[in-house]
């Protein structure tokens, strides 16, 4: 599979057979993205789905529960007004914390996301998780690959910390990429890997 970042909290996961969109909307009022065809679209904030123009072919998930779409297994859990997800796709477990705020992961939350292979979470602060909180969550989940979201550059006019604040707090430099290709057999086994994606807006 291949993962790209479209800016804000919007990610695209693609394989030859399936396209998955994670939070395909802008966090900046008035900013929009062009419509993209997908098989599956996940929304952390149900209100954003109502305001979004998603192609009719997309299977939309915007609520907690268990789902299976084209051999993608999705588990959603409500945390305050947002939904966090665990996806199992091509034998890789991806935890997507979406619009996670300043709360801590509860034991029930950890039951869902602990041990995920890939963790995607906000790190830029503001209304969402900041660098220090993100590092604590990473240490709880213990993923193989960390992909940060909601940092500058990539947040438009929204105030958010620069990615370097998170890198300093995390203590791992990481690699900056246009996209990342992930497969079960190539997951790092020893050291955790930090992948900083460039926004593809």
Image: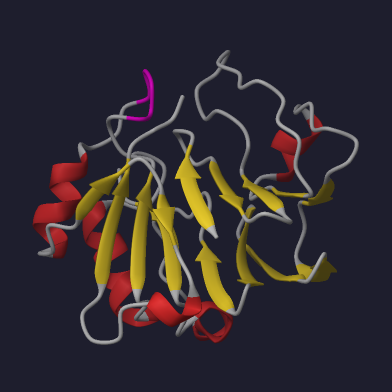
Please tell me whether residue 88 is drawn above or below residue 50 in the rendered image.
below
Which residue is depicted at the point 63% across and 37% down? Answer: 24
Asked whether 197 or 10 is in front, the reply is: 197
Magenta-colored span: 154-158
Asked whether 172 or 43 is in front, the reply is: 172
Q: Residue 156: say if magenta.
A: yes
Which percent across, then down, holds residue 198?
33, 37
Q: Is residue 25 left or right of residue 127?
A: right
Which residue is depicted at the point 44% across and 33% down? Answer: 7
Asked whether 110 or 143 is in front, the reply is: 143
Which residue is depicted at the point 24% across and 54% down? Answer: 131
Say how the picture is coloured. secondary structure
Q: Quadrant of residue 38?
A: top right
Which percent across, then down, holds residue 84?
59, 62
Q: Is residue 192 left or right of residue 102?
A: left
Characterize the magenta stretch by its predominant secondary structure. Answer: loop
Quarter of the image with the N terminus in it: bottom right
Please tell me whether residue 63 is drawn above or below residue 45 in the rendered image.
below
Which percent across, then down, holds residue 175?
21, 53
Residue furthest to the top in view is: 30
Q: Is residue 90 left or right of residue 132?
A: right
Please tell me whether residue 151 is drawn above or below residue 159 in the rendered image.
below
Which percent across, then down, holds residue 59?
85, 50
Residue furthest to the front in view is: 16
Q: How many numbered marks have been drawn onto this rendered protein structure?
A: 0
Which residue is depicted at the point 13% across and 59% down? Answer: 169
């Amino acid at each position: 599979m291949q993962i790209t970042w479209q800016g804000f909290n919007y990610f695209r996961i693609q394989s030859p057979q399936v396209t998955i969109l994670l939070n395909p909307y802008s966090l900046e009022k008035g900013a929009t993205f062009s419509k993209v065809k997908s098989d599956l679209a996940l929304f952390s904030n149900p209100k954003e789905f109502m305001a979004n123009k998603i192609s009719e072919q997309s299977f939309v998930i915007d609520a907690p529960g268990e789902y299976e779409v084209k051999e993608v297994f999705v588990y959603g859990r409500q945390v305050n007004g947002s939904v966090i997800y665990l996806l199992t796709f091509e034998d890789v477990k991806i935890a997507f914390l979406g619009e996670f705020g300043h709360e801590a992961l509860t034991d029930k939350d950890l039951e869902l996301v602990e041990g995920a292979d890939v963790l995607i979470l906000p790190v830029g602060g503001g209304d969402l998780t900041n660098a220090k909180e993100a590092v604590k969550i990473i240490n709880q989940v213990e993923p193989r690959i960390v992909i940060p979201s909601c940092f500058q550059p990539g947040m438009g006019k929204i105030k958010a910390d620069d990615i370097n604040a998170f890198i300093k707090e995390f203590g791992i430099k990481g690699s900056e990429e246009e996209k990342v290709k992930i497969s079960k057999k190539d997951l790092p086994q020893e050291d955790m890997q930090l992948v900083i994606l460039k926004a593809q807006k």
